[in-house]
Image: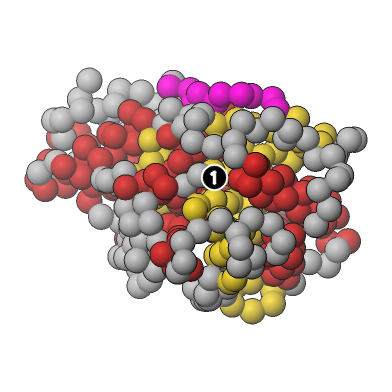
Amino acid sequence: MAEGEDIGLDDLGTGAEVAQVVRRIARVARDLSKRIARGPLEGHGATRGENSDGDTQKALDLIADEAFAAALTDSPVRWYASEEREEVAALNSAGALALAIDPLDGSSNIDTNVSIGTIFSILPAEEDPLTSVLRPGTDQLAAGYVIYGPQTALVLTLGKGTSVHVLDPETGRFEQVAAQLEIPAASSEFAINVSNYRHWGAPVRAYIDDCLAGDTGPRAKNFNMRWIASLVAETHRIVSRGGIFLYPADARRGYERGRLRHVYECAPIALLIEQAGGAATDGCDRILDRVPQSLHERTPFVFGTADKVHRVAAYHDLPHEEVAALFGRRGLFRQ
Ligand SMILES: O=P(O)(O)OC[C@H]1O[C@](O)(COP(=O)(O)O)[C@@H](O)[C@@H]1O
Ligand SMILES: [Mg+2]
Ligand SMILES: [Mg+2]
């Protein structure tokens, strides 16, 4: 891929190789954003098959995956691990980096004109492809997402804060609009797919019960609920105005470890959330400390404003009688 065309992102303040990979991802994202904006005019909503995880693949999932892989073949990326591929693919044998990517997140929303995104994680490459990506999220050299919404924006961490870069469609450049994001502490929004309520464990039910009870419950304040079913869009809302996101484990078959994938969804989002002052756990433990065992492994995922995330962990530590009690009788957390 030509490096010449101006994409912005000039002074990333990181090593040349990581910066080159980020810029190439941004170039593909810029092209993708145009295709996404054309919507049905591109005819890309059609279902094409299933990925390794059994999820329905849209044509645009595959187009995005091919475009990122093609753009990175002669880059410093040695190993390319994608949601859309069963195995880690080999790109440049001389490359020093590994890339894990969800080329298109929330693609079930394409037809509905809701914001979707690309999530990526850049890691050091080891000799073995899987060893390169099955490691703690603290090893990430960079992580980010691109949101394709009313604005196309890149939210990026290089391990020292989280920055936001908005694509100017007039110039084709990503312009930095925030150098150091801080997730707002005060927020009364929570995001969870409440249709799964009956399948959740007692601690998650208790946490949500107490939010739903509003100013009549132990939290003594009213909350608002959001669910876009597009992880990147939920993340963007939370980095912009705080709140909490939960996709917990539940009792449905296949959801014993939740829905979201550790390597290319949760680990990169966890890093950029922490770098923006927030927290990310599997309900109890820090996501970035977990070592995944397989490429497409799932994990329960809770992230957002730090004190809210820690409160969810505290519900998991409550004695069973306390957590199973109706909110009216739950003593702890009563303000
Ligand atoms: O439909 P559900 O169960 O609410 O799940 C929604 C979640 O699934 C996802 O769409 C999964 O991502 P993909 O679209 O990449 O498979 C997330 O973006 C979203 O948070
Ligand atoms: Mg996804
Ligand atoms: Mg996807």
- Residue 272 in the image: state x and y as whole percent: 50, 38
Question: Mark 1 highlights which residue?
Answer: 143
Q: Residue at x 47, y 66 (%)?
A: 127
Q: Residue at x 51, y 29 (%)?
A: 161
Q: Which residues are magenta?
A: 176-185
Camera sees residue 40: yes
Quarter of the rendering occupied by the N terminus: bottom right
Residue 182 drawn above or below residue 297: above
- Residue 297 in the image: state x and y as whole percent: 40, 65
Is residue 183 within the magenta segment?
Answer: yes
Q: Magenta: predominant secondary structure element? A: loop
Camera sees residue 233: no
- Residue 140 in the image: state x and y as whole percent: 47, 47
Q: Residue furthest bottom?
A: 49
Left or right of residue 196: residue 32:
right
The local crowd at label 1, few if under 14, some if 14 to 19, many if 20 or more residues have their Cα within 10 Å, is many
Instruction: In this rendered view, identify the residue nearer to me: 100 or 93.
Output: 93
Instruction: In this rendered view, identify the residue nearer to me: 61 or 159.
Output: 159
Left or right of residue 212: residue 40:
right
Q: Residue at x 22, y 20 (%)?
A: 335
Identity of the amino acid at label 1? Answer: Ala
Residue 168 drawn above or below residue 62: above
Query: Residue 51 occupies which quadrant of the picture?
Result: bottom right
Residue 96 drawn above or below residue 312: below
- Residue 183 in the image: state x and y as whole percent: 49, 26
Is residue 36 within the magenta segment?
Answer: no
